[in-house]
Image: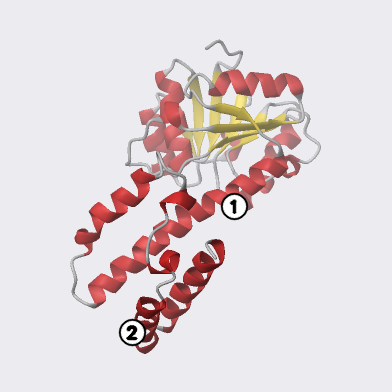
């Protein structure tokens, strides 16, 4: 896929930066620098992406086609303002799903390059299957970013700030909240000296089933059946053991009952 973006640098060396820098480097894109306040992290990623690492923002080379901010949401604005003060025309994007374009202030060459996936440094991922959501008020830059994303992904879409905001909320439900429920189940099993691994086939079946069946159609369990006897027994046990789990169980049960009433 042809792209006018040939040289990039990253602000950040975390999970997202790691996967993107390595992916673009493998496709022949020059990763010029990796910046991070944590030198060990930036050095590691620089080695993995055939680039240079810096720990001082003053050493940042602004002679790149695109600067990618892959850092925590609450530091994007501060870092971007420092860099844009030096070069207001540099092309910049961030990778956040919940932060809008306004974080770049009045910058004209700004956009959002959001990969809709949960990343871990040590977990390999099929980057070509990761949806990339592109946002920019600059039509020329938007088209450049779309072409750039298609270098590594087969799923590239143009989204507005508003659309991406709502999709990010949905992503929190399917990823962060579901994973937290798995963690609660693990703790519950350990508390009762049960083997959590016995739940793994059920977890895998639950996840893979919705590849072919809509979640609403795949729902099972006592709440879906409105089996009040089992629900009441579960709630009685949990109320005597753990107030937090009791409330979560009751809230989710009520939500399921309402959906299928």
Image location (x, y in percent) of residue 249: 43, 73
Instruction: Report the Cα–Cα distance between label 2 and label 1.
Output: 32 Å
Q: Residue at x 25, y 55 (%)?
A: 200
Image location (x, y in percent) of residue 129: 44, 29
The answer, for residue 244, to whether it is visible in the render is: yes
Who is closer to the viewer here, 132 or 194?
A: 194
| Residue at the top extreme, as displayed | 2
Q: Picture quarter containing residue 68?
A: top right
Image: 198 above or below 165: below
Q: Residue at x 43, y 26 (%)?
A: 128
Q: Residue at x 53, y 20 (%)?
A: 150
Label 1: which residue?
Answer: 169
User: Is 217 on the left or on the right of 63, as rendered?
Assistant: left
Q: How is the image coloured?
A: secondary structure
Image: 165 above or below 133: below
Who is closer to the viewer here, 100 or 25?
A: 100
User: Is 176 on the left or on the right of 60, as rendered?
Assistant: left
Q: Picture quarter containing residue 19?
A: top left
Mark 2 residue crowding within 10 angstroms, few (<14) / some (14–19) / many (20+): few
Image location (x, y in percent) of residue 176: 47, 55
Label 2: which residue?
Answer: 237
Q: Split into 4 quadrants, where in the image is the C terminus?
A: bottom right
Q: Which of the two labelled residues, at mark 2 and mark 1, occupies the earlier sequence position?
A: 1
Could you say whether the residue bearing mark 2 is in a helix, strand or loop? helix
Q: Residue at x 68, y 36 (%)?
A: 83
Image location (x, y in percent) of residue 22: 41, 28
């Amino acid at each position: 896929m042809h792209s006018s973006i040939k040289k990039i640098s990253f602000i950040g060396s975390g999970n997202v930066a790691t996967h993107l820098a390595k992916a673009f480097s493998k496709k022949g894109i020059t990763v010029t620098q990796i910046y991070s306040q944590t030198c060990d992290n930036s050095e590691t990623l620089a080695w993995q992406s055939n680039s240079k690492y810096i720990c001082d923002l003053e050493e940042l080379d602004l002679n790149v086609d695109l600067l990618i901010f892959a850092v925590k949401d609450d530091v994007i604005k501060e870092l971007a303002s420092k860099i844009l003060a030096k070069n207001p025309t540099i092309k910049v994007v961030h990778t956040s799903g919940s932060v809008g374009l306004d974080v770049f202030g009045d910058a004209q060459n700004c956009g959002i390059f959001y990969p809709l996936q949960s990343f871990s440094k040590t977990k390999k991922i099929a980057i070509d299957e990761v949806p990339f959501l592109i946002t920019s008020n600059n039509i020329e830059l938007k088209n450049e970013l779309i072409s750039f994303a298609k270098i590594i992904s087969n799923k590239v879409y143009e989204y507005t700030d508003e659309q991406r905001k709502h999709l990010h909320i949905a992503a929190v439900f399917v990823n962060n909240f579901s994973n937290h429920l798995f963690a609660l189940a693990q703790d519950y099993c350990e508390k009762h000296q049960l083997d959590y691994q016995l739940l793994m086939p059920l977890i895998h079946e639950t996840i893979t089933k919705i590849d072919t069946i809509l979640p609403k159609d795949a729902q099972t369990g006592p709440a879906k059946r409105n089996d009040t006897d089992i629900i009441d027994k579960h709630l009685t046990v949990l109320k005597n053991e753990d107030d937090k789990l009791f409330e979560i169980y009751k809230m989710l049960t009520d939500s399921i009952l309402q959906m299928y009433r």
